């Protein structure tokens, strides 16, 4: 699904409006964010997922033509990456560290019984290169094209929630919904679908960056529409991970398409985010990966004010 490639070029501050695309507003902080200058990773692909490792490095998973599967790369925080392996039959891979310290992956694979794509889970080895026995979550695409891109997050109570994209029952362009299911216990293997939708109106590639009681943060992409409306990145907040409000103002410019964001925390209200980007053209496109720093909340507002002051000084000098 090509609605997974997105991201940054220059820092653009996000305002504080609440999007009509989202579910009813929660009590969480306003979704405000800004993106810093991007760094190209020298990697071709889309739908990345990032893990911060204990040694300070970043492990990056992404579908790659170079490896013929899901590439596994090790990156420095500065953005120097090297591919160390590959996993077969595991598209759009995401993972969490469970309360017992083990890693569990969630990914899309072909279901031989239904003949549709489905979301599966499997234990993930410590080096991130090997999957254990695959277990179906009984979440099926049922043949839908605008579907998938799961994101797994560990809840404060130790259970796991998986978010994914589904087409709207009404159909139409850029109308996808984000939905979710939550595991019945801390093993993260049996899931029950959550009632309702998390977002509506054409938001895709949902990624939770923070899941604290009363203080959730997510980054996502808009659905691809046309060359005049490229995919762009947005932020949202929630108090429980179920009811979200999304800021409709883009983090990214319109000169490129930005999609499939993922990220790791780097400090108070700062995250290092990774995403795919591509030209705004029809037909086959090349997707490349970049990274940039996302600031949220009061820090994002402060960064925005600094940028505006710099722009004013430049104009006066000119």
Image: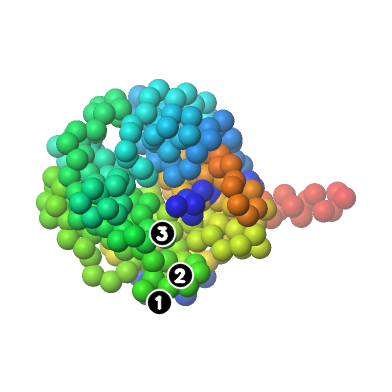
Residue 186 in picture, x, y percent from top left: 14, 47
Give the mark count: 3
Residue 139 in picture, x, y percent from top left: 24, 57
Residue beneath label 1, please?
Answer: 170
Residue beneath label 2, please?
Answer: 175
Label 2 sits on a secondary structure element that is loop
Assess disc 1: are there few (<14), some (14-19) or many (≥20) residues with their C-alpha within 10 Å of its C-alpha.
Answer: few
Q: Earlier in the sequence, mark 1 or mark 2?
A: 1
Residue beneath label 3, please?
Answer: 145
Question: In percent of the image, x 25 and y 49: which residue is there?
Answer: 111
Mark 3 → mark 1, Cα distance in angstroms:
15 Å
User: Does residue 291 appear left or right of residue 165 in this picture?
Assistant: right
Judge depth for marks 3 and 1 and give the one in front. Answer: 3
Judge depth for marks 1 and 2 and give the one in front. Answer: 1
Question: In percent of the image, x 43 and y 38: which residue is there?
Answer: 63
Residue 18 in picture, x, y percent from top left: 48, 71
Q: Is residue 106 above or below residue 142?
A: above
* Residue 265 visible at all: no
Name the image quarter holding residue 240.
bottom left
Check the image and name the residue furthest to the right. Answer: 318
User: Does residue 317 appear left or right of residue 35 in this picture?
Assistant: right
Q: Are marks 1 and 2 in contact (CB under 8 Å)?
A: yes
In the image shown, does 277 or 99 lie closer to the viewer?
277
Q: Are marks 3 and 2 in contact (CB under 8 Å)?
A: no
Judge depth for marks 3 and 2 and give the one in front. Answer: 3
Q: Is residue 261 above or below residue 77?
A: below
Mark 3 → mark 2, Cα distance in angstroms:
13 Å
Label 3 sits on a secondary structure element that is loop
Coloration mode? rainbow
Label 1 sits on a secondary structure element that is loop
* Residue 79 visible at all: yes
């Amino acid at each position: 699904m090509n609605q997974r490639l997105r991201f940054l070029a220059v820092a653009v501050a996000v305002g504080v409006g609440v999007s009509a695309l989202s579910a009813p507003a929660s009590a969480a902080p306003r979704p405000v964010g800004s993106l810093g200058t991007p760094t190209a990773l020298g990697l071709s692909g889309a739908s990345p997922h990032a893990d911060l490792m204990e040694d300070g490095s970043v492990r990056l998973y992404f579908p790659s033509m170079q490896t013929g599967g899901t590439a596994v790369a090790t990156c420095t925080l500065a953005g120097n990456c090297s591919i160390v392996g590959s996993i077969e039959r595991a598209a759009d891979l995401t993972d969490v560290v469970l309360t017992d310290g083990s890693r569990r992956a969630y990914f899309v694979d072909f279901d031989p019984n239904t003949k549709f794509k489905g979301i599966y889970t499997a234990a993930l080895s410590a080096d991130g290169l090997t999957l254990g026995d695959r277990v179906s979550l009984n979440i099926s695409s049922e043949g839908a094209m605008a579907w998938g891109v799961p994101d797994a997050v560990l809840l404060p109570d130790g259970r796991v929630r998986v978010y994914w994209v589904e087409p709207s029952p009404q159909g139409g362009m850029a109308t996808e919904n984000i939905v979710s299911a939550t595991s019945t216990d801390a093993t993260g293997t049996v899931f029950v679908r959550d009632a309702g939708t998390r977002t509506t109106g054409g938001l895709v590639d949902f990624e939770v960056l923070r899941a604290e009681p009363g203080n959730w943060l997510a980054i996502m992409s808009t659905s691809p529409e046309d060359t005049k409306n490229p995919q762009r990145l947005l932020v949202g907040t929630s108090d429980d991970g179920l009811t979200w409000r999304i800021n409709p103002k883009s983090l990214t410019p319109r000169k490129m398409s930005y999609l499939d964001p993922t990220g790791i925390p780097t400090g108070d209200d700062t995250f290092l985010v990774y995403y795919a980007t591509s030209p705004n053209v029809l037909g086959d496109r090349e997707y490349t990966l970049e990274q940039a720093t996302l600031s949220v909340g009061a820090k994002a507002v402060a960064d925005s004010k600094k940028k505006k002051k710099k722009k004013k000084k430049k104009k006066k000098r000119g």
